[in-house]
Image (cartoon, rainbow, N blue to C red):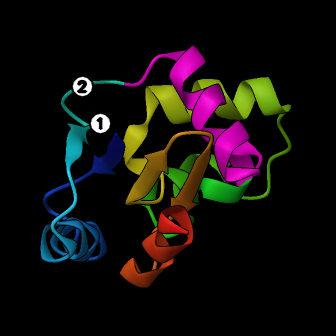
Amino acid sequence: MITIYHNPKCAKSRAGLSYLKDKGLEYKVVEYLKEPLTRETLKDILMKLNKGPKDIIRTNEEVFKEKLRGKNFTSEEWITLLLENPKLIQRPIVVSGYKAVLAQPAEEIEKLLK
């Protein structure tokens, strides 16, 4: 089953969702701003992305610019910051089995379908 971590207010996230619909794939939508991620889920997603927490931060968000830019945190601290400020998580993230992609552009989802 494919899971898309989605923010309906984000154009890139909507494009990822449209891509899945257009392909006729079965998927589950998780609106992570409404359904907060657990620490375990976020760590699992990062492992499947093969990225660290700092790699998925949206650096254009105000909270990043005002409070986090230029600061050094451990990976665990970054995870806590992402869980406390889920708007900082880049989207959409699409997960299938043991793999995940940051679907920017939406065509990145193809990597999960091979």
Question: Quarter of the image holding residue 48?
Answer: top right
Q: Nearer the viewer, residue 85 or 1?
A: 1
Q: Position of residue 47 (x, y in %)?
A: 72, 38
Q: Is residue 50 visible?
A: yes
Which mark, by number, is residue 66?
A: none
x and y, in percent, of residue 25 in the image: 22, 60
Tell me, yes or no, if residue 58 can be seen here: no
Residue drawn at (47%, 46%), measured in percent from left and top? Answer: 96
Q: Residue at x 55, y 69 (%)?
A: 114
Callout 2 amino acid = Glu
Which residues are the magenta region? 37-54
Q: Find disc 2 in the rendering and name its residue.
A: 35
Percent position of residue 95, x then y: 47, 47
Label 1 – label 2 distance at C-alpha: 5 Å
Give amino acid for label 1: Tyr
Residue at 43 percent of width and 59 percent of height: 62
Q: Is residue 63 left or right of residue 72?
A: left
Which residue corresponds to mark 1? 32
Rendered view: 1 above or below 100:
above
Q: Is residue 66 left or right of residue 30?
A: right
**Going by the image, does 87 lie left or right of 67?**
left
Check disc 1: other Cα within 10 Å, few if <14, some if 14-19, many if 20+.
Answer: some
Measuring from the top left, give residue 64's x and y in whole percent: 55, 54
